[in-house]
Image (tube, rainbow, N blue to C red):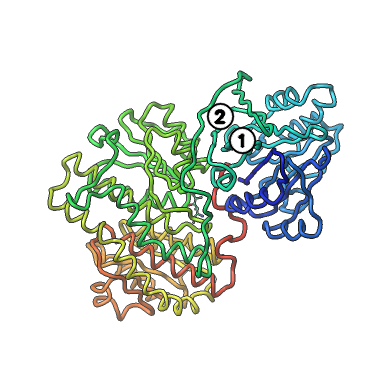
Amino acid sequence: MCGIIGIVGTSTVTERLVDGLKRLEYRGYDSSGVAVLDGGKLIRQRAEGKIKGLVAKLATDHVDGQIGIAHTRWATHGVPNETNAHPHFSGRVGVVHNGIIENFLDIRKELSHRDFRTETDTEVVSHLVDEALSQGLAPKEAFSQSLKKLKGAYAFGVIIDDHPDHIYCARAGSPLALGIGEDEMYLGSDAMALAQLTTKLIYLEEGDWAILTPTSYEIYDVDDNKVERDITILTGGPAMAEKGNYRHFMLKEMYEQPETIGRTLSNYIDEYRLSANVPAELDFSEFDRVIIIACGTACYAGMVAKYWFEQVAGLAVDVDIASEFRYRKPVISPKSLFIAVSQSGETADTLAALRYCKEAGVKTAALVNVMTSTMAREADIALPINAGPEIGVASTKAFTSQLTALASLALAAGTARGMISEDDQKRMATALIKTPRHVKQALRLDKDIEAMAFEFSKSKSAFYLGRGSQVPIAFEGALKLKEISYIHAEGYAAGELKHGPIALIEDGTPVIVLAPYDRLFEKTISNLQEVASRGAHIILITDKEGASHAESMADNMIVLPTSDSFVAPIITTVAVQLLAYHTAVHLGTDVDQPRNLAKSVTVE
Ligand code: M6R
């Protein structure tokens, strides 16, 4: 999953392409590059690593023109060095690509007479187009015929030597938007990349390809028929999220949570009636099952929702990671509601699962942060979380907003299905309304957690334990720690440890126990004792009541504000986020852009 952008116009493009790349850096930061036509000739500049490397190179060796394409890479095929950085050139053709060409080896064999210079799958595209040009085809035919030979996922931008006013682009499986300007046209992986250039966007549909000139655009569908696509007007302005006085985006985003959760609630909770509001098309009395599909952190939000939907609404829930679901031939009851949970709304596997369920004929919803995303556009119902742009690769505020929205949906389901009393409905709605305040109080523990993280950062591995709806938060705590501090960590259901993993506990092994004072508290504390008696160093995350019962059993304690057990997973999340964050800061890792990761995973 990479980010691409292109401009064809009447003034110079490089600075604006690089600005667009910075907005796309969340998609990958292994290398970046820009190519332009200068006097009709292809030239480029590329650099290994983050975009600042490209900026430094351009400062000493500038390239510019009135037409150009640019790329920020998350490496799939070929190590992340300058040779493998896009744009790739073959003969007259330059290309940037997001996706994976699955049949690239076959095409390489077919074109074995050509000089391949990189280890990438993408290079076959520039060779295919150049080969077709050298056989005498016009650029339009060369491009469209090359597309027919490709299998896999792609969004491309192509420019051609001595063909200065045209960008060719296409999408299948990876998102691509066109932008319409004054005497300029644009292409970009998402709306954010183009937000500083135009407000008029066209989202290409699956299989579409297009030709852009400064004053025109033509769109063709997968069968090469000329088609019209709707123009979307972008609202919200070009503002790119800023770090302000915070050291990292992740820290800022954690601190935004009282506000972002409040915004999510305003979509779903009626503060006067103390009830949940959902779109009219979402009639929970119609469904006999909910299928929640997501990846990573978003999937853990789905796992918490399983507890909520089952307990509050008596509704069966299947939760699965998207990459497994899509190839498993799952049995789907016609009365299922499918919910894709995704911050970006672009995650390739989650999107494929959504399409699978659409084809199966069940109602689909997408719970997303980016309402211009492919999932939001393709699902029957788009459910916003309104957390605002999340820049840190480690998801924080999107997760707590996903939880907030899913809790509200479960509450709406409980009411619609007559499974909860009015008193319970009001109690749960009130608990949700108080959540921003409780999260704010939890954030005040920041300094204490920072101090605790100093010792913790010396650990080689850690365990996170919980029961009930805290189990997915144990998974999430372990994931946060792994992805930003690179310390090995595992989350477990507390009752499961003695079935094997307890063998790993030795003197000083850190075990983070999530145990708010609820009906499972005593059972979790028994599990705490099992590991403590084997030498584990216990960090207990609990609330006031829990602390008064278990103080003597923990080496460190994080005492959160007391909340209704319904929303407790949202509050404990704040503690595991802060612990991971400060551990990573102590270790000096790149918190916002950890190694090997990208914010949005648009390849399988
Ligand atoms: O955009 P999505 O919510 O679909 O992304 C899913 C995962 O890739 C994402 O949650 C990932 O696990 C995060 N890096 C976790 O912090």
Ligand 1 near label 2 (Cβ, under 8 Å)?
no
**Is residue 522 shown to the viewer in this render?**
no
Number of the front mark, 2 or 1:
2
Q: Give the quarter of the figure containing the N terminus.
A: top right
Q: How far apart are labels 2 and 1 at the CA level?
A: 10 Å
In percent of the image, x 71 and y 46: which residue is there? 13
User: Relative to the observer, which residue lies in front, 589 or 196?
Assistant: 196
Specify the amino acid type for callout 2.
Glu
Q: Residues within 10 Å of mark 1 (few under 14, many from 20)?
A: many
In percent of the image, x 79 and y 44: which residue is there? 118
Q: Quadrant of residue 532?
A: bottom left
In percent of the image, x 30 and y 57: which residue is there? 468
Q: Quadrant of residue 219?
A: top right
Callout 2: helix, strand or loop? loop
User: Relative to the observer, which residue lies in front, 207 or 240?
Assistant: 240
Instruction: Determine which of the numbered discs, if any, sits on residue 90 in the image.
Output: none
Q: Residues within 10 Å of mark 2 (few under 14, many from 20)?
A: some
Instruction: Determine which of the numbered discs, if any, sits on residue 153 in the image.
Output: 1
Left or right: where 25 falls relative to 576? right
Q: Which residue is mark 2?
A: 206
Left or right: where 193 falls relative to 396? right
Q: Give the quarter of the figure containing the C terminus.
A: top right
Left or right: where 560 falls relative to 44? left
In percent of the image, x 59 and y 23: which residue is there? 221
Lower position in the chain sequence, tag 2 or tag 1: 1
User: Relative to the observer, which residue lies in front, 221 or 351?
Assistant: 221
Callout 1: helix, strand or loop? strand
